[in-house]
Image (cartoon, helix red, strand yellow):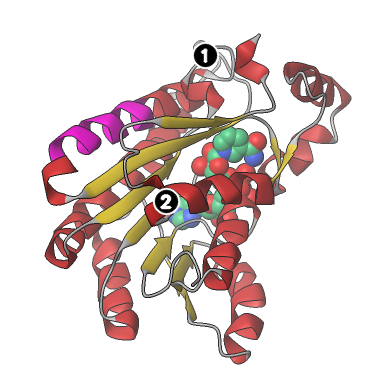
């Protein structure tokens, strides 16, 4: 038996990187997947060929920070797959290692809207449908930047806020059998970081930040998301799964 058989998952920010790796792994493990992203053509580039093989996956254009668009996401998931069991709030932006004085209000608002308000809206939209099903699993993709400082003020604040949003939901939704956890990745090689690592100074910061001396692959993060989405983690809620090659152990 596959690990997500009969489960329907919504994965945001799935055009590439961690979201795409997670959505593909979920399909392999038997889930129905609604993959969303604001960049629909990049998303469809990999979803449509997979769908043609018979996989239970749909691509949908979606801005996580726009409250009105979540209704479309829920309606599509219910129409295609009948129920919603898993939400992976993965979409996020990283504006760079910018400190407080260098951060404009516009950048701050955009980072908070995408990285914190987006997951909040996703939880609000999905919780009633998970409750109807008798439970569910929400996995919020935070960051070690939400555990320790020095990674940019807006980004750290958004990811730290996401960790506590998750813990609050874990406590208040336990009675509904809805589990809520975060993944806190260290540096992962994805489209988000590809441009940064081409700059030598950033490459040094990233590689020297981990005792393993390397970045993670998106797949290494997706394995953790799968664990938190599956029934194997049935007693795990309100926790942060740190996947960082030992970076915050220093
Ligand atoms: N790459 C890393 O080193 C790293 C480390 C820690 C945490 N994270 C987090 O992991 C998550 C995935 O990042 P990634 O590295 O795969 O980056 P990525 O840039 O490859 O993927 C992020 C995706 O989110 C989408 N997106 C951005 N804003 C959106 C919006 N408003 N609505 C819908 N989609 C939107 C982008 O189009 C993109 O496809 C993010 O939340 C990121 O903060 C990444």
Does residue 157 appear left or right of residue 171 in this picture? right
Q: How many marks?
A: 2
Q: Residue at x 28, y 68 (%)?
A: 84
Q: Position of residue 30 (x, y in %)?
A: 49, 74
Q: Which of pointers 1 and 2 lies earlier in the amino acid sequence?
A: 1
Q: Residue at x 56, y 20 (%)?
A: 152
The image quarter in which residue 215 lies: top right
Mark 2 highlights which residue?
A: 232
Q: Is residue 213 above or below residue 188?
A: above
**Mark 1 packing: few (<14 Cα in 10 Å), some, or many (20+)?**
few
Boundaries of the magenta span: 161-172
Which dot marks residue 83? none
Does residue 51 appear left or right of residue 209 in this picture? left
Q: Position of residue 128 (x, y in %)?
A: 14, 59
**Secondary structure of the residue carrying numbered label 2:** helix
Which dot, 1 or 2, sits closer to the camera?
A: 2
Q: Is residue 242 visible?
A: yes
Q: CA distance from mark 1 to mark 2?
A: 29 Å
**Mark 2 packing: few (<14 Cα in 10 Å), some, or many (20+)?**
few
Q: Residue at x 67, y 21 (%)?
A: 246
Q: Position of residue 49 (x, y in %)?
A: 66, 84
Q: Residue at x 26, y 80 (%)?
A: 82
The one of 150 and 11 positioned closer to us in this rendering: 11
The image quarter in which residue 95 lies: top right
């Amino acid at each position: 038996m596959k690990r997500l058989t009969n489960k329907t998952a919504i994965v945001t920010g799935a055009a590439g990187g961690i979201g795409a790796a997670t959505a593909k792994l979920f399909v392999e493990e038997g889930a129905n997947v609604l993959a969303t992203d604001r960049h629909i053509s990049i998303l469809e580039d990999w979803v449509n060929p997979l769908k043609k093989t018979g996989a239970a996956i749909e691509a949908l254009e979606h801005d996580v920070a726009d409250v009105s668009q979540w209704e479309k996401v829920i309606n599509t998931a219910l129409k295609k797959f009948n129920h919603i069991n898993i939400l992976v709030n993965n979409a996020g932006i990283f504006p760079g290692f910018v400190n407080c004085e260098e951060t404009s209000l516009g950048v701050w608002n955009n980072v908070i809207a995408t990285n914190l308000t987006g997951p909040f809206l996703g939880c609000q939209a999905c919780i009633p449908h998970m409750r109807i099903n008798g439970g569910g699993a929400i996995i919020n993709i935070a960051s070690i930047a939400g555990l320790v400082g020095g990674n940019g003020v807006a980004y750290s604040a958004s990811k730290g806020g996401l960790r506590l949003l998750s813990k609050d939901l874990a406590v208040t939704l336990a009675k509904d059998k809805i589990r809520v956890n975060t993944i806190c990745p260290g540096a992962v090689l994805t489209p988000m970081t590809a441009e940064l690592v081409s700059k030598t100074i950033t490459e040094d910061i990233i590689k020297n930040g981990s005792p393993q001396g390397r970045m993670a692959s998106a797949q290494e993060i997706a394995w953790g998301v799968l664990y938190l989405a599956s029934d194997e983690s049935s007693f795990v809620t309100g926790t942060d799964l740190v996947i960082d090659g030992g970076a915050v152990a220093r």
